[in-house]
Image (cartoon, grey):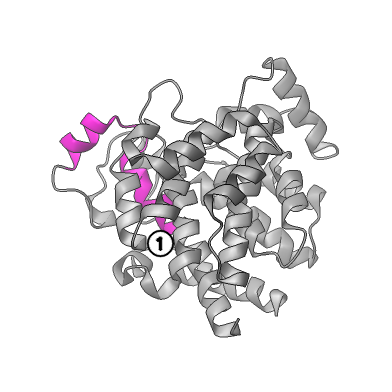
Amino acid sequence: MENEIIKERFLGTIFGQAIGDALGLSTEFMSKQEVDRFYPNGIEDYSQIVQDDHRRRWQRGDWTDDTDMMLCILDSFVACQKVDILDIARRFKEWMMNGGMGIGRHTYNVMALGDYTSNPQKAAEIIWKMGKKKAAANGAVMRTSVVGLLKENVTSNAENICKLTHYDPRCVGSCVIVSSIIHALVFEDRILDYEEVIGIAKQYDERIVPFIDLAYHEGLDSLCLDDEKSMGYTLRTLGAALWTYWHATSYKEGILKIVLSGGDADTNAAVAGAILGAKFGICHIPDEWKSGLLYASMLHDKVLEFYAMYR
């Protein structure tokens, strides 16, 4: 495939995630009813984001922890010119120690363990087992998009980077699926079909399958993204992203449908946005969303640096 198209999709993936994250903040933790109340005419721009106690911690047009942590991974790839698991873990910890705004409880618990940076996967396993192997939060799938832009070993790298904080096989499977989808779009101009995605899921955990089914066969509402008790579940986020991947006709349409569903909307829209950006390319993301992003030029430079490494 032409290098220019690949470059378009590199930019689309990373900007797609950051914009989804920044717009998704507008409805994060809201029920569908609250979304309708605060945004009766939908949302078109960062300037419309309501400024309550939660949202005013970020400036309008800024992304949250989802993209911060993804950039820890990207920066590590560029600095090390390879995948260095311990370097990524060190960057995660540094980010946390420097404020780590928006950090999830599970991620915090893992990174707060004493020797996290020397054996991060062990720390993640310990916290997972302490929680009776029930925790499968979306804090790893939210940052995995950039792994799909590696030229090789996407599956093993997605697994290993996921396990730096999230050890559950549902989390690992979610990360491999999202990274594989992005890789196929960017480097092969190919959409993974339903059977291929099911095939990946079954290698990790059968519990992933029903969410793929809902995303493929049903409407977005079937995923109950605003369910109060489980909105941060990795499989709800995966389902939302898969729904847009198979059904959205444009980046804008897909993102707005996710954002206006409420729940963990910044994470759902970050993952969906990365996939849609990889699918449609940066040119098909609305200009006002790109220019309104607070650190757009910095992000652009980072992506080009990473793309140069691919070249």
Which residue corresponds to the image point at 69% horizontal and 14% vertical from the top-left? 132
Tell which of 238 and 76 is nearer to you.
238
Which residue corresponds to the image point at 52% horizontal and 63% vertical from the top-left? 14
Q: Is residue 34 magenta?
A: yes
Q: Which residues are magenta?
A: 17-39
Question: What residue is shown with label 1?
Answer: 294
- Tell me where residue 4 appears, x and y as whole percent: 55, 84
Tell which of 71 and 235 is nearer to you.
235
Which residue corresponds to the image point at 63% horizontal and 30% vertical from the top-left? 206
Which residue corresponds to the image point at 51% horizontal and 76% vertical from the top-left? 8
Q: Is residue 130 magenta?
A: no
Residue closest to the far right: 118
- Tell me where residue 233 appears, x and y as whole percent: 51, 30
Residue 116 at least partly seen? no
Q: Amino acid at mark 1?
A: Leu
Query: For the C terminus, which image quadrant?
Result: bottom right
Image quadrant assignment for residue 154: bottom right
- Tell me where residue 51 appears, x and y as whole percent: 27, 41
Q: Classify 268 as above or below 60.
A: above
